[in-house]
Image (cartoon, rainbow, N blue to C red):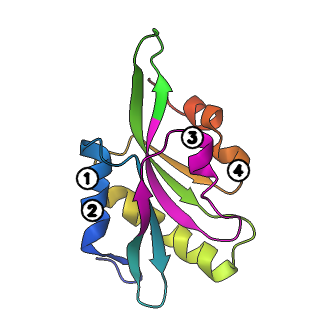
Amino acid sequence: MTKGFAAFTPQVEETFDQVKETDTLDYVFYEANAHDKKINVAGSGKYADYTDLIAQFKEDTPRYAVIKFKYPAPTGGEERHKIVLITWVPEEAGIHDKSYYTTNKDHLYYSLDGISLHVQAHSQAELAHATILKQFKVL
């Protein structure tokens, strides 16, 4: 591991696998701690409405989130999903937190196998369902 990168607690990959491979979880939030250089699970669960999920992103607290991004099939019919990593670094966050989250985002992205899209967001508008949906090349 490269010096300066945060280590992952065992729950990071376990919870990611639950989101990716089962129907028990739709999302997991991760927090990075610069003092002990670890990334921990901050919370996880299922969501019924995407707006309820994005309301959990606080305006002053950076977070990573892995979500099952749900969308209607382009041909109609059943709902589909893709695994999305969101790096949430809001403008109101402290400079040290912004720097630490930005430094570790690629480390987390490349360590979690099966992510379809990585989104770096600074505002609620960048988390909007339509905004993220437009970033996919193939649905």
Label 2–label 1 contact, CB within 8 A: yes
Reply above or below: 108 against 3. Answer: above
Question: Looking at the image, which is closer to me, 10 or 45?
Answer: 45
Q: Position of residue 48 (x, y in %)?
A: 50, 39
Label 3–label 2 contact, CB within 8 A: no
Label 4 element class = helix
Q: Earlier in the sequence, mark 3 or mark 4?
A: 3
Q: Which residue is mark 3?
A: 50
3D distance between C-alphas at marks 3 and 4? 12 Å
Q: Position of residue 52 (x, y in %)?
A: 60, 47
Q: Earlier in the sequence, mark 4 or mark 2?
A: 2
95 relative to 108 in the view: left or right: right
Asked if residue 90 can be seen in this view, the reply is: yes
User: Is 46 a magenta residue?
Assistant: yes
Q: Amino acid at mark 3?
A: Tyr
Q: Which residue is mark 1?
A: 17
Label 3 element class = helix
Q: Residue at x 46, y 38 (%)?
A: 69
Q: Amino acid at mark 1?
A: Asp
Q: Which residue is mark 2?
A: 13
Question: Looking at the image, which is closer to me, 27 or 132?
Answer: 27
**Badge 2 local density, few (<14 within 10 Å), some, or many (20+)?**
some
**Badge 3 local density, few (<14 within 10 Å), some, or many (20+)?**
few
